[in-house]
Image (cartoon, grey):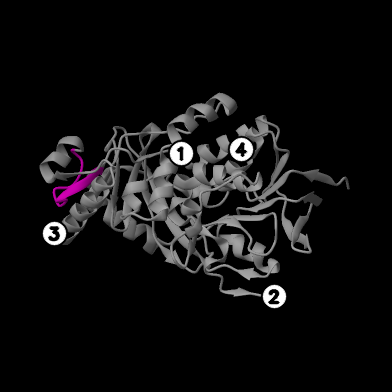
Amino acid sequence: MKQENYDAIIIGGGVNGCAVAYNLAKRGRKVVLLEKDRIASKSSGAAAGMIAAQTELDEDGPLFSLARKSRSMFTDLAIELKKVSGIDIELVNKGMYKVALTEEQEEELKGIIKVQTNLGEKAEWLTANELRMKEPAISSEVRGAMYVPEDGQVSAPHLTAAFASSAAALGAEIKEFTDVYSVEYESGQVKGVITNEGRFTSENIIVCTGAWSKKVLEETNIELDTYPVKGECFSVKTTKPLVEGSIFSHGCYIVPKRGGRLIVGATVKPHTFDQKVTVDGVATLMEKAIKLVPEIASTEWETAWAGIRPQTGDGLPYIGEHPSIHGLFIATGHFRNGILLAPVTGELLADYVERKPIDEKIVSAFRIDRSMVHQFE
């Protein structure tokens, strides 16, 4: 079998792997992306696509800074990807409402608003009446909401496909159904990978295999502090739009999509790779969704699914270079922020591969060696 050498090999065809492939291809690098299933077949295809920098992240810190930077990239990116691939990522900028159902939640959200506005971000408290002026379908049980006009959403499968198709249009090779058996390295330098399709060689390999990254990296003598988290979701169809903006609450979100669809998610079930959708999971989400938007009870059922998201012990993703193997880069542990962080992750990993200067203040919190469970000499 013919053996080819590449400037970079990307393992994993989720949103971050495809974003890395796109950024490197855009810079004229010869890259190949290897995916053991189909593009966006795991959590990137299951995600609701929220760009929830302020809604998901409550306080200032390295992840909040990274998330805001990534969020700011989406408007130009949507135009760029549509131009190159012809795929519309369905970017919607109609804001997000983080609602309060109790007095305690109301006070908590008002505190978050104060922190975020002090950081220069847009966020405001809407009373129950002000909220229902904007979103009449929201339940009278809701006390009010933190309104974040800058948070939006995309179609997660379309974003992933657009990155992959754009990368391919710029010369990248996208190889589905290509399972990586092992990563080869010698004297602290990565050399290539062995797959069911043969050997691919490169001095730059980027591992973007989500919740499965731990297994891929085991043979490289590190064990990252990561674990899988199952998230179950369901979707319904409506003849008229029920909400304009995305609704976010404790344990439930409702995201309006094109064609009268609403996505409701997501359960949080840690330490499992089981992708079965349970009656308990869907029933819990239904109860919470109907409490937020009662009219959901009379919508038409569409489907349900589950995705496995990669979480880390400290809640921060791993983005950077392997501590002892030169040229082996890792991007995993994005948990519920994989879609949001994809633009900046793709750019950062391309910078790492090209050995461009990277601001340590931005990336030091995401270092691979910050919390390794075990490392062999």
Q: CA distance from mark 3 to mark 1?
A: 34 Å
Q: Return the disc, 2 or 4, that comes first in the chain's sequence.
A: 4
User: How many residues crowd around disc 1 within 10 Å: few (fewer than 14), some, or many (20 or more)?
Assistant: many
Q: CA distance from mark 2 to mark 4?
A: 35 Å
Q: Residue at x 60, y 38 (%)?
A: 23
Under mark 3, the amino acid is Glu
Under mark 2, the amino acid is Glu
Q: Nearer the viewer, mark 4 or mark 3?
A: 4
The circle drawn on residue 377 is: 2
User: How many residues crowd around disc 4 within 10 Å: few (fewer than 14), some, or many (20 or more)?
Assistant: many
User: How many residues crowd around disc 3 within 10 Å: few (fewer than 14), some, or many (20 or more)?
Assistant: few
Instruction: Decide which of 45, 162 is in the foreground and name it.
Output: 162
- The residue at which mark 3 appears reads as 103
- The residue at which mark 1 appears reads as 155
Q: CA distance from mark 3 to mark 2?
A: 53 Å
Q: Residue at x 34, y 59 (%)?
A: 283
| Marks 4,1: beta carbons within 8 A | no
Quadrant of the image occupied by residue 60: bottom left
| Element assignment for label 4 | helix
- The residue at which mark 4 appears reads as 22
Q: Nearer the viewer, mark 2 or mark 1?
A: 2
Q: Return the disc, 3 or 1, that comes first in the chain's sequence.
A: 3
Q: CA distance from mark 4 to mark 3?
A: 46 Å
Q: CA distance from mark 4 to mark 1?
A: 18 Å
Under mark 4, the amino acid is Tyr
Q: Is residue 180 above or below residue 255?
A: below
| Span of residues in magenta | 136-147
Q: Position of residue 119 (x, y in %)?
A: 28, 47
Q: CA distance from mark 2 to mark 1?
A: 44 Å
Q: Residue at x 63, y 41 (%)?
A: 21
